[in-house]
Amino acid sequence: MAPEREVDVIRRVVALLQERLPADWSVPTVRLNATVGDHEVDALLDLESPGGRAVLVVEVKNQSVVTSRLPMVAEQLS
């Protein structure tokens, strides 16, 4: 089986997220290949609650992450 394209992986993430959100929440905006501060990320997803509050979700897709690098990866995203 061929590897999935990045856009297909992101679409799947959005679909899985929407399945798990309460029905009155939405994902109105998905921005691909965005920048957060000095970091390039694969996607930014805006989540919106029924009251209009917004949450930003950052998605970074890596082929693999070695366990010893997890703290560094988490620090880059904070």
Image (cartoon, rainbow, N blue to C red):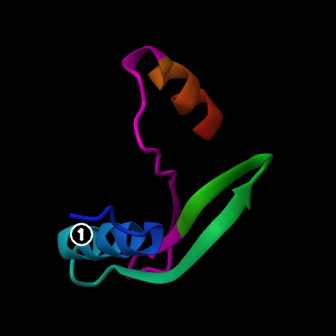
Specify whether 76 is left or right of 5: right
The number of callouts visible is 1
Residue bearing the label numbered 1:
16
Residue 47 location in percent, x, y? 45, 72
Label 1 environment density (alpha carbons within 10 Å; few <14, some 14–19, many ≥20): few
Residue drawn at the location 33% of the way across and 79% of the way down: 25
The picture quadrant where one finds residue 77 is top right
- Residue 48 colored magenta? yes
- Residue 59 colored magenta? yes
Residue drawn at the location 43% of the way across and 80% of the way down: 51
Specify whether 21 is left or right of 63: left
The picture quadrant where one finds residue 16 is bottom left
Q: Nearer the viewer, residue 76 or 9?
A: 9
Q: Nearer the viewer, residue 51 or 29?
A: 29
Q: Amino acid at mark 1?
A: Leu
Residue drawn at the location 42% of the way across and 44% of the way down: 63
User: Height in image: 49 above or below 75?
Assistant: below
Specify whether 28 is left or right of 16: right
Specify whether 19 is left or right of 31: left
Q: Secondary structure at mark 1?
A: helix
Residue 37 location in percent, x, y? 78, 49
Q: Magenta region: which residues?
A: 45-68
Is residue 78 visible in this depiction of the protein? no
For the C terminus, give its image quadrant: top right
Residue 1 location in percent, x, y? 20, 64
Residue 48 location in percent, x, y? 45, 77
As drawn, the residue found furthest toward the top would be 68
As drawn, the residue found furthest toward the right would be 38
Is residue 11 visible in this depiction of the protein? yes
